[in-house]
Image (spheres, rainbow, N blue to C red):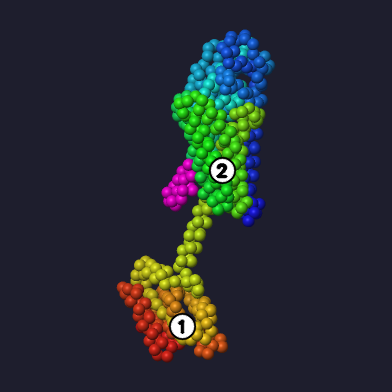
């Protein structure tokens, strides 16, 4: 089956398009704001310690992100002024979005605030969630500049978006973000915990790899967005935040590769891609490990490798899933559909760390939406896989219960089902018919064993058509069949047996055989408390009595 046909057969293509549409709508909403136009000038390095009057270069306005600090100059000072020459009246909020782990400090002219960052908010400084937001009761008179000091030492310094909003506008935007982030993270956590439950119940490590990836990625998103600090209130030191992020990143990539390998059936559909993917996971883990070693050179190398590997790893995982899907793996297609938006958001977000796509301010929100969408799609795929595995298991069980020639129950399955029936309703009426094909050896000698097999198939079909749904019919062995008739008296069972005997006789009367096939049937009714094996033994004895009396007849025990 080709990739396009699978796409439409799984009905997931429509869900993917709809999710992407919703992400685009959210992106356009996220960019719409009532921010005050700002003039931002930048001083880097030693210049940041200079006085307010020191020379400075224009940076950008608030329509795009601003790359403030760098590895060579981790300290910077921003001079923020109103483009109109005067500040708006009333309480305002200076919002810095996407500041990552950089420390920020604001000076409004009346004194500097405490240093703060997304993961270390202060109630007297931070105004909301998911960003650094300085609440300002009164802005400087005469349009004097605000000073914002940035410290990016030891961390990646992503471009920041700086906006000035009224307190009312900011609270509305913050409430919308909090509701959105909470909903997206809750979906991912719920799917991850559910996968752990199914892993324990089904003993399938595929669910473990999925849950491990999903929960690690939830930690990454909650860390990057500041959700762990506000509203969850977790405290992070300067070392623990980047460390936990790198560990979570390595774990997420490793679990993702293991999950794709098992869920997408790469061993069968894309065996040549398994080694490169495992090598990628090992490289990400190694680069993350370098960043925690007590050696500055190793830490710098690790930080420089981690994001490029993630940027390369995203498309690699997606291409591996698409290739396996093209080769016939339906579950790899689920993986590709769920991961395409997420990998795109992750890779593009990593590019922003290097100064690309600065105007795409919606990417920080797209990761949350793409993560929730991926969790739902992959959970649907896992559910579909579980249903198919159960269907295959039931099919195998049914095949194990059936005689391959006649399609009837085999002897073991018949004994199990009739024993279960007697255990559930021990006082229920039950009759057993023991059926033997007369002179079957002569047919094999005259026409061959193939003809004998065909005759057995025909007899099985004739008997099944005459019996009811609750009745059980099985091949006992060779040319012997056995039937169980619940809720039958001995007389009613004998009448049914006579009808079966007559059908077989009529069917083979004109078959052109030297000796037409007939059946001899013994009937026994189960007495109260009688063992099942004893009932079968009595029916067998009655069948032999019928054969001794001339065959082609019914005898009751």
Q: Quadrant of the N terminus?
A: bottom right
Disc number lying in front (2 or 1)? 2
Q: Is residue 254 visible?
A: yes
> Percent position (x, y) of residue 111?
53, 12
Q: Furthest-left residue in view? A: 529
Local secondary structure at mark 2 = helix
Inter-mark Cα distance, 2 to 1: 63 Å
Residue 109, relative to residue 332: is it above or below? above
Q: Residue at x 51, y 78 (%)?
A: 453
Q: Residue at x 57, y 36 (%)?
A: 310
Q: Residue at x 64, y 29 (%)?
A: 356
* Quarter holding residue 541: bottom left
Closest to the observer, 104 or 285? 285
Q: Which residues are magenta?
A: 191-212
Please tell me how crowded label 2 is: few (under 14), some (14-19), or many (20+) other residues with Cα within 10 Å: few
Q: Is residue 421 visible?
A: no
Please tell me how crowded label 1 is: few (under 14), some (14-19), or many (20+) other residues with Cα within 10 Å: many
> Percent position (x, y) of residue 96?
58, 24
Location of mark 2 (residue): 276
Residue 147, relative to residue 474: is it above or below? above
Q: Quadrant of the C terminus?
A: bottom left
Closest to the observer, 487 or 230? 230
Residue 7, relative to residue 219: is it above or below? below
Residue 158, relative to residue 428: is it above or below? above
Q: Residue at x 48, y 47 (%)?
A: 207
> Percent position (x, y) of residue 307?
57, 32
> Percent position (x, y) of residue 133?
55, 23
Name which of mark 2 and mark 1 comes first in the sequence: 2
Closest to the observer, 514 or 349? 514
Q: Furthest-right residue in view? A: 84
Location of mark 1 (residue): 437
């Amino acid at each position: 089956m080709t990739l396009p046909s699978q796409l439409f057969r799984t009905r997931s293509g429509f869900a993917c398009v709809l999710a992407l549409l919703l992400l685009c709508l959210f992106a356009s909403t996220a960019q719409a704001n009532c921010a005050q136009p700002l003039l931002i000038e930048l001083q880097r390095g030693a210049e940041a310690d200079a006085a307010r009057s020191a020379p400075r270069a224009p940076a950008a306005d608030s329509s795009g992100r601003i790359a403030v600090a760098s590895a060579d100059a981790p300290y910077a000072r921003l001079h923020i002024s109103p483009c109109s020459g005067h500040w708006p009246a009333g309480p305002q909020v200076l919002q810095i979005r996407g500041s990552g782990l950089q420390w920020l400090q604001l000076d409004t002219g009346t004194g500097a605030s405490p240093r703060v960052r997304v993961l270390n908010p202060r109630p007297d400084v931070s105004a909301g969630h998911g960003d650094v937001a300085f609440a300002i009761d009164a802005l400087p008179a005469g349009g004097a500049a605000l000073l914002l000091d940035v410290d990016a030492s030891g961390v990646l310094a992503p471009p920041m978006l700086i906006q000035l909003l009224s307190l009312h506008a900011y609270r509305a935007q913050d409430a919308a973000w909090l509701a959105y982030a909470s909903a997206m993270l809750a979906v991912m956590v719920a799917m991850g915990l559910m996968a752990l439950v199914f892993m324990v119940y089904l003993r399938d490590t595929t669910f473990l790899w999925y849950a491990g990836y999903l929960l690690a990625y939830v930690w990454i998103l909650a860390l990057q967005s500041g959700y762990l600090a506000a509203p969850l209130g977790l405290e992070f030191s300067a070392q623990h935040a980047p460390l936990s992020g790198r560990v979570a990143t390595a774990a997420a990539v490793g679990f993702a590769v293991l999950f794709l390998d098992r869920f997408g059936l790469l061993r069968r559909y894309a065996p040549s891609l398994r080694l490169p993917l495992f090598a990628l996971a090992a490289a990400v883990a190694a680069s993350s490990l370098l960043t925690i070693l007590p050696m500055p050179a190793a830490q710098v190398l690790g930080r420089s490798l981690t994001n490029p590997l993630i940027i390369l790893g995203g498309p690699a995982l997606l291409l591996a899933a698409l290739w396996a899907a093209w080769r016939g793996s339906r579950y790899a297609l689920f993986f590709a559909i769920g991961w395409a938006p997420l990998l795109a958001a992750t890779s593009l977000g990593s590019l922003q760390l290097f100064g690309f796509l600065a105007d795409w301010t919606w990417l920080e929100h797209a990761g949350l939406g793409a993560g929730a969408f991926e969790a739902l799609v992959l959970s649907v795929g896992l559910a579909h896989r579980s249903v198919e595995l159960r269907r295959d298991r039931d099919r195998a069980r049914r095949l194990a219960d059936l005689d391959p020639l006649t399609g009837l129950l085999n002897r073991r399955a018949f004994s199990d089902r009739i024993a279960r029936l007697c255990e559930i309703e021990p006082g229920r009426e039950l009759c057993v018919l023991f059926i033997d094909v007369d002179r079957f050896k002569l047919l094999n000698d005259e026409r061959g064993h193939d003809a004998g097999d065909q005759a057995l198939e025909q007899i099985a079909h004739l008997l099944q058509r005459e019996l009811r749904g609750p009745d059980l019919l099985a091949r006992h062995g060779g040319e012997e069949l056995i039937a169980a008739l619940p809720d039958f008296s001995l007389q009613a069972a004998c009448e049914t047996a006579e009808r079966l005997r007559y059908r077989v006789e009529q069917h083979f009367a004109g078959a052109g055989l030297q000796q037409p096939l007939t059946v001899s049937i013994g009937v026994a009714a189960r007495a109260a408390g009688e063992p099942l094996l004893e009932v079968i033994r009595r029916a067998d004895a009655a069948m032999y009595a019928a054969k001794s009396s001339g065959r082609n007849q019914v005898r009751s025990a």
